Image: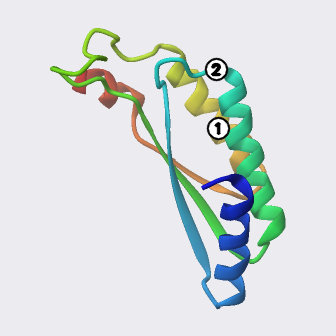
Amino acid sequence: LDQEEIEVAAVNAQAGGLKALKLYGMVGVPGETEQDVDATIAMMLSLKKAAPKLKLTLGCSTFVPKSHTPFQWYGVDKAADKRLKRLEKELRKAGIQFRPESYKWSVVQA
């Protein structure tokens, strides 16, 4: 789905009587940049504007590489903790709930 399709779905959900919408994301994916985080924030703010009556929530986890995959030696990206905090700061001040998975728990899992 692209951003426009997600916005249309949010507007339709609101028009259909839904009260809340929860989206899920991930930080720390190999190759992720600050621009990716900027895009996530922009998308959530755009959804808030398009469907202002919806209670928006973003659940977010940290990428944890699993053994026997091409990513097994990557480890947990140390920048992920900072990105989670940035998402929390920007989204909460816009009235969007942010539910991150614990960065420390992600490190334990890795």
Q: Within 10 angstroms of label 1, few (less than 14), some, or many (20 or more) residues? A: many
Q: Could you say where residue 80 lies in the image, as x and y percent from the top left?
A: 51, 23
The reply, left or right, for residue 17 in relation to residue 61 is right
Residue 4 quadrant: bottom right
Label 2 belongs to which residue?
Answer: 33
Looking at the picture, how far across and down is residue 65, in whole percent?
29, 23
> What's the mark number on residue 87?
1
Q: Is residue 108 left or right of residue 29?
A: left
Quadrant where the image shows the C terminus: top left
Which amino acid, by three-letter code, is at mark 1? Leu
Q: Residue 107 has which mark? A: none
Residue at the image point whose x is 63% and y is 41% from the top: 88
* Scheme by which the image is coloured: rainbow
Q: Amino acid at mark 2?
A: Thr
Mark 1 or 2, nearer chain start: 2
x then y, percent, for residue 22: 53, 63
Residue 17, above or below 83: below
Task: Answer above or below: position of 60 versus 79.
Answer: below
Q: CA distance from mark 1 to mark 2?
A: 13 Å
**Which residue does the image show at 34% across and 11% down from the upper left?**
74
Density class for disc 2 (Cα within 10 Å; few <14, some 14-19, many ≥20) is few
Q: Is residue 17 above or below residue 3?
A: below
Q: Is residue 63 left or right of residue 100?
A: left
